[in-house]
Amino acid sequence: MTLLNLVDIKKQYDIKNILDGISFSINEGDRISIIGKNGAGKSTILKIVAGDEVADSGERIVFNGIEIKTLSQHPIFPAGISVREAIEIQLDKIYQAIKNYEDISKKLELDFNNNELILQHSEISTFLDHHSAWNIDNKIERILNEFYLKELETRSVNSLSGGEMRRVALAGLLLQKPDLLLLDEPTNHLDVYMVEFLENLILRENYTILFISHDRYFIDRISTRTIEIDNGKIIEFSGGYKGYLEGKNLLLNSMQKQHEDMLKILKQENEWFARGVKARLKRNEGRKTRLLELRDKAKTNPSLMRKMRLELEREEKNFSREQSVNRQKMLFELQDLSKSLGGKKLILKLNLRIVQKDRIAIVGRNGTGKSTLLKIFLSKLEIDSGKIKRGEFEIGYFDQHREMLNDDKNLIETFCPNGGDRVDVRGSNMHVFGYLKQFLFPKEFLDKKIGLLSGGEKNRVALALLFTKKIDCLILDEPTNDLDIATINILEEQLQNFHGAIIFVSHDRYFVDKIAHKLLIFRGNGIIEESYQTYSEYLELEKELAQIDELISEIEHTKNIIQDKNSKNSNSRLSFKEKTILEQYPKKIESLEKEIKTINKCLSDPKCYELSGISKLSEELLKLQNNCDNLIEELLTVEEKAENFK
């Protein structure tokens, strides 16, 4: 049964199109995850579904007066009530239904043929069945225990931390079991055991939910469908996170084939013009228009496809290995953050979420604001506008100035300020010499003053000291500057063994490739892009796009020269078959392109490709593409011959 439809929904904030004509349905029993970058519009979709936000255009259709409930990021409870009361207050309708059911049951004992009472009894029974509310008190006890709220049940709910209050709100929502439950990051503030309980409860009680989550295991176990939002559009995939990755691979392979066809046509066209071919005949203007469209796509497709491919490869790798209990820990969350210095825009409306496992390289030209962002993370600079949320965690900072070192102290005093000769390194108690040996320091250096060391040696000391700190996040500003290769290798090894988040600025391509899982690319004028490419691949892509620009410029230049020549058209030397090709093939090619477009659209819709079969569709697509390629080659050959007769 369909509960809600969104039809051609559009939403714009300022000049940015957040949602650009999206449509999807929510059916009873659906568990739909929404994924996408921060700022892509995930929360906007939830708000529109909830009715808290009005779309600029399109329709929100709610069927049968269904009950929709939302988990607030910042729940508010009445003053002076306990944790248990805060949960029970959310269940007023259920408690009232139970009371009415008991009252009517007693009346029916005396008047068991009363049809009106029988109908009321049946309706209330159906309501309690739907909300799984027959043993509500037992379920309250269970959820109090599983969410670690039992020992807090008599405390004032408003005295709890923000995370504990969210757990209280989530408990109440789950016990209400509305027709449609909307959850924004439900596993935040839950440990791995709580998450497992939540997963089992949702599956057992068959909730209908629409949710946002960064927890890929949770998405994979819970979701019946996954919706990705990107550039205002959505694509639906069947199943959870694995289904999403498989579906993206199918789309990517199809895009790759189309892109190869585009480049082949572009190269043929360039050779054709270069040989002095004259302007196209009027009957071929339709193909010329399609060719111009292909040129535009050729410029954008390499970036899109490479990004998709690298994201898939990285996500598949991370998805298989991510098992840390702390994987949900949020460090920083930036919302529309902006910063200017000296009248220069460095950061413009940046939306970014950094969690415990992230390894982010900040790259770009000098002077674009990379170090400024690090200083904002370190609370050394105030922001101009927007918001920055910080979790509870410890930061370790390494910069080019080695501010953590005291030149008057020797190595022993630096690493063992409270005396002794042992140091704690990520839970291992080590002799300071044994530890410093890893950083290439001989034993005789232990008594040497920091001020007498070279710049490179001071860097090694600063790095060694950094990894003795109990920290959740490393922030590094050009860490490889002034380091030799041996020391860089040591740094890389230490970073790869570090279990927290790493945020760093670097121009060292090899170092960035080895350490980073994600890039923040500072393009200048405040524009910052996220990418899951390696740094080398990003730079390679820049070259490829430049080459495509050059190819298109050559085509346009040659075309302009040729269009200046006027000559009469004649195809009298063509055979009957060749004339037929000129007259009929453009329409045939156009028809094949429409069929190819239809199949590609089906491959992006789980309902369509599940009905027809992915293998069958893929075979049909390959056959059509090959046929289309052959027709284009024949047409180009005949057109070239015809042009040479002009």
Image (cartoon, rainbow, N blue to C red):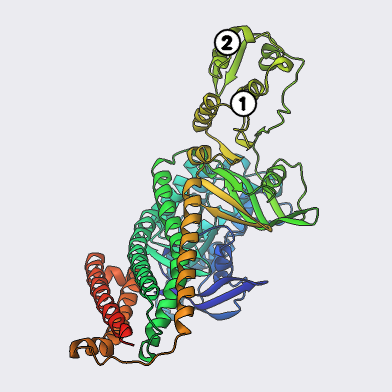
Q: Is residue 222 above or below residue 507?
A: below
Q: In the image, what residue occupies the spot 62% across and 33% down?
A: 481
- 359 is higher (above) or lower (below) than 30: above
Question: x, y percentage for residue 137?
Answer: 51, 52
Q: Position of residue 387 (x, y in %)?
A: 71, 54
Task: Relative to 292, say whether 515 is above or below.
Answer: above
The disc placed on residue 463 is 1
Name the secondary structure under disc 1: helix
Using residue 467 as the reference point, say whether residue 407 is left or right of it. Answer: right
Q: Quick one: 543 or 26, which is closer to the camera?
A: 543
Work out whether mark 2 precedes mark 1 in sequence or the reverse, and give the earlier one.
2
Q: Quadrant of the C terminus?
A: bottom left
The residue that appears at 50% across and 44% down in the rendered structure is 517
Query: Which residue is identified by label 2?
Result: 442
- As shown in the figure, which amino acid type bears the numbered disc 2? Pro
Judge depth for marks 2 and 1 and give the one in front. 2
What's the CA distance linking mark 2 and mark 1? 16 Å
Give coordinates of residue 586: x percent, y percent.
Answer: 30, 85
In the picture, measured across the screen, residue 31 lies left or right of residue 155, that is left
Quadrant housing residue 47:
bottom right
Binning the other alpha carbons within 10 Å of mark 1 as few (below 14), some (14 to 19) or many (20 upward) gives many
